[in-house]
Every structure is written in structure tokens, then in C-alpha cells.
Image (spheres, grey):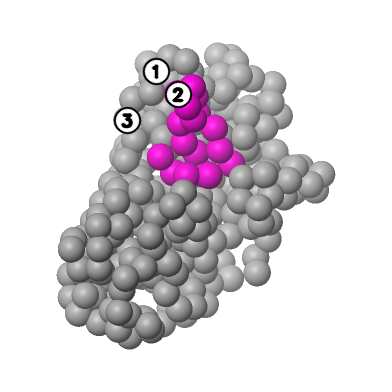
Amino acid sequence: MSRLMTAVAASVGVAILATTSATNAGRLLDKVLKSKTLTVAVGTDWGPVSHLNEKHELEGYDVDIAKHIAKSLGVEVKFFTPGWDIITAGKWEGRWDIAMGQMTPTAARAEKFDFPAIYFYEQVFAVVQNGSKATKLADLDGKTVGVTANTTYEAYANHALTADWKGSSPVTYQFEPGAVKTYASTNVAFDDLRLGDGVRLNAVITDGTSANNAIGAGYPIKLLGDPLYAAPGAIAVLHGDKEFSGKIAAAIQKMKENGTLSKLSLKWYGVDYTTEK
């Protein structure tokens, strides 16, 4: 799922916290409560996940969820917008407390992160330009495929995806790209794909929600074939504070039980993606 971020103006509450990684050694919850601020990493061009509106304010599904989590902790929320590659590298240095972005909780990522709550389930597709001659996934053999860097999409394109999260099914590779081109965000990949089949790309691998959002915005692209695989999206925090992770888990669980999570999914996607299909 995404994604190149840029620094966002103070109007969206961006703040760099002058803390160190030691904050995550069991004291993160105390820091959040004492500062009365939960700092959250999100994206600025992740479509309905999180984006900047016409007023240059952050909004989206993940933004609303982060606000609910902060409210459950009794604190304010501030947003930070690093690149997806920086988020997944895990060297946060205390600059933000949690990362949104619907991160797939793979075993490799679990070496760096705790995943206190799953809050989204996505299906991943190959997306082609409307003028593409491809009629089935196998037609993408040997073609140039775009993916967001450091995602399960990139791993799939390179036939290196290990579906080892809870409830996962074995991955079946339905085509073998001739070249894999990485992007900082799915939107940038779509910008290349819209130029025409084979001009820069023949396909993009991404989640169906991002693709449908782009289609709704007028991009001349379409889904090709059935989903390549399905995966859960989780909130990520660094290891070290189980109590903090527990508070995040409890907040999401309450949102599931009272229907808030489903309502937010319907608000931003028109579909309830909060349960596994």
C-alpha cells in the first residue's frame, strides 16, 4: 500500500518530538500521557487512507481512526508524514508513536514492530491501462510492472512474498514480470500507467481500494483478473511497551464493537473492509 510523503504545514499539526529511541523502552505510554499528545505517522497522498484536502488538511480513514485512538487515551493527536520507506525501516527515533498505513503484519516486519490491532482487510490486484491488450494475468509475463517500494506488492512482483501473517493462505504467482519498477507512492505509479500501455509501465500491483479510488478520479485504468492475494492491515508500533500496545488494541476493539470502525470504512470507501472476506 503507498507512498511518498512530504512535510506538512503546521495547520495539520505536524510535530517532530525531541525524544530518543529509549522512549520505546517501556515508557512510551507515559510519554504520550504526560505530553498529552499522540504523534501518528500517516501519508499525504494515500487516497481514502489519508490525504491532504483542498484546505491542505489531513483527512481520511486512517486519520479518523488515529483521532479516535487519541481520544480514547485522553490526549490530542498530531500527525507526521514520513515516507513509507522510512516508516517500514523502523528507525523512528521517537519522532512518532504509531504508524498507520494499513501495514501487512508479516513475520519479517514483526522483528521490528508490534502490531496491536488489525483494522482493515485488503485485496491486491494487477491494474492495467484501459488500452491494454492484456485480458488475463498471464498476459503480464515479461511486462514492466510498477509497485510501491517496501511493500508486499513489491515482494509479490519479485516472487518473494511469504504469506506468514495469521490466517494467511499460500501465495500463487500468476505471472512473472520482465521488470519491476519501484515508486515512492502508488499514485505516482498510476501517473506513469495512465500515459498508455507500455509507455512506462504495463501494469501496477496495488490494493483494490487505491485502484478504485483512482478510477473514480478519472484515471483510465482497470483491474485485471481476480485478486492476487488478500492481506490484513495493522497499526504498527515499535517493540518495548506492551501497555501502550494494549491501549491501542483496546481502542480498536471498542471501535469494532460499537460499530465505529465499520462506519468509518463505509464513509471513506463505501464498503466495509473491517472484516475478513
Rendered residue at 29%/51% (across/down): 191
Q: Is residue 183 left or right of residue 245?
A: left
Rendered residue at 38%/23% (across/down): 8
The picture places residue 158, in percent across and down from the top left corner, at: 26, 71
Q: CB under 8 Å between callouts 3 and 2?
A: no
Residue on which the image places disc 1: 9
Q: CB under 8 Å between callouts 2 and 1?
A: yes
Between circles 2 and 1, the one closer to the viewer is: 2
For residue 56, which numbered disc appears in the image?
2
Q: Nearer the viewer, residue 164 or 157?
A: 157
Q: Residues within 10 Å of mark 1 (few under 14, many from 20)?
A: few
Between circles 3 and 2, the one closer to the viewer is: 2
Residue on which the image places disc 3: 6
Q: Amino acid at mark 3?
A: Thr
The picture places residue 213, in percent across and down from the top left corner, at: 49, 52
Residue 12 visible, this orientation: yes
The picture places residue 33, in percent across and down from the top left corner, at: 61, 19
Q: Amino acid at mark 2?
A: His
Rendered residue at 33%/66% (across/down): 129
The picture places residue 173, in percent across and down from the top left corner, at: 36, 81
Distance of mark 1 from mark 3, alpha carbons?
A: 10 Å
Q: Which residues are magenta?
A: 45-61
What secondary structure is the magenta-colored segment mainly? loop
Q: Earlier in the sequence, mark 3 or mark 2?
A: 3
